[in-house]
Image (spheres, grey):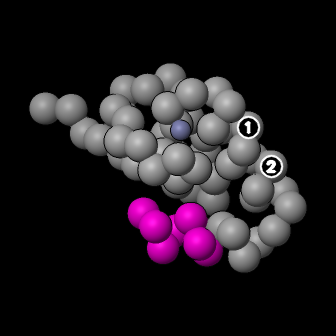
């Protein structure tokens, strides 16, 4: 049975087998595509508040 995760950028459901992922503060985030991952990395660099927004979405 496959686990699924939510892309924190576009909120699409993605498989946890996705290779587009990043590790952040001990959690792994999965993305539908590389450009969503880039957006996530930019957001987390620019503001710390957005990080909490992303967490509340998940
Ligand atoms: Zn996405």
Which residue is disc 2 drawn over? 42
In the image, the segment drawn in magenta is 52-58
Residue 13 placement (x, y as % from top left): 35, 42
Which secondary structure is most common in the magenta stretch?
helix
Near mark 2 (Cα within 10 A), the count class, few <14, some 14-19 or many ≥20, is few
Residue 3 percent coordinates (x, y): 25, 39
Towards the viewer: 23 or 32: 32
Assess disc 1: are there few (<14), some (14-19) or many (≥20) residues with their C-alpha within 10 Å of its C-alpha.
Answer: some
Q: Is residue 55 magenta?
A: yes
Answer above or below: position of 5 versus 38: below
Residues at badges 2 and 1 in contact (C-beta under 8 Å)? yes
The residue shown at (45%, 50%) is: 11
Secondary structure at numbered mark 1: helix
Residue pictured at 68% horizontal, 31% vertical: 35
Q: Is mark 1 within 8 Å of ligand 1?
A: no
Vertical side of 27 occupied by 16: above or below: above
């Amino acid at each position: 049975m496959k686990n699924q995760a939510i892309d924190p950028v576009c909120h699409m459901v993605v498989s946890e087998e996705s290779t587009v992922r990043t590790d952040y503060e001990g959690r792994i985030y999965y993305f539908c595509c590389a450009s969503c991952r880039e957006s996530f990395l930019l957001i987390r660099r620019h503001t710390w508040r957005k990080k909490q927004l992303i967490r509340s979405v998940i």
